[in-house]
Amino acid sequence: MAILVTYDAKQGTNKKIGAALARGKKFISGELNFSGQTYATGGITCSFVGFSTLDSVWLQNQDGQVLRYIDSTGKVAVDGLASGVNVGSWTAVKFLAVGN
């Protein structure tokens, strides 16, 4: 199973910040829902629709754990978290994704 990604309302996947900031870049915010997930070594699959490339993804920490997105694998990983740990209570993890 994968993480459910929800973009903030009235934003879609074409939200662009002015050319003065980043020409052609998309800045998307929203929430990740880990409901029903248990952690697996290497992370949990997460797909951000509407991007051909991702430059960076910032994720809100949960229960003292630092979450990070690994672009090369398309997974959300948590360093030091053992495989099999239930992360299903993480149902509204805020994120900001930047890319094209």
Image: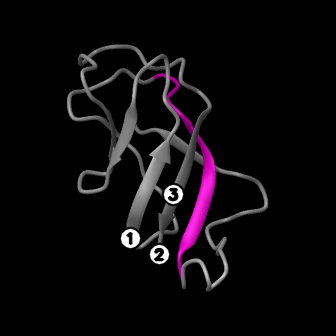
On screen, residue 52 above or below 82: below
Question: Toward which corner of the image does residue 55 lie, by quadrant?
Answer: bottom left
The residue where tag 2 is placed is 100
| Location of residue 50 in the rendering, given as x and y in whole percent from the top left corner | 52, 68
- Local crowd size for mark 1, using a 10 Å CA cut-off: few (<14), some (14–19), many (≥20): few
The residue where tag 1 is placed is 53
Query: For this view, does 32 lie left or right of residue 18?
Result: left
Nearer to me, 74 or 29: 29
Query: For this view, does 38 lie left or right of residue 88?
Result: left
Sequence order check, earlier mark of 3 and 1:
1
Task: Report the residue that reaches farthest toward the right.
Answer: 10
Decide whether residue 28 is among the magenta residues. yes
On screen, residue 31 above or below 17: above
- Element class at badge 3: strand
Q: What segment is highlighted magenta in the picture?
A: 24-36
Cβ atoms under marks 2 and 3 closer than 8 Å: no
Q: Rounded to the nearest whole Å, what is the CA distance between mark 3 and mark 1? A: 10 Å
Cβ atoms under marks 1 and 2 closer than 8 Å: yes
Picture residue at 40% right of the left edge, 14% below the top: 86
Tag 1: residue type? Thr
Tag 3: residue type? Ala
The residue where tag 3 is placed is 97
Picture residue at 38% right of the left edge, 70% below the top: 53
| Location of residue 98 in the rendering, given as x and y in whole percent from the top left corner | 50, 64
Query: For this view, does 53 lie left or right of residue 83?
Result: right
Q: State whether the magenta stretch is mostly helix, strand or loop.
A: strand
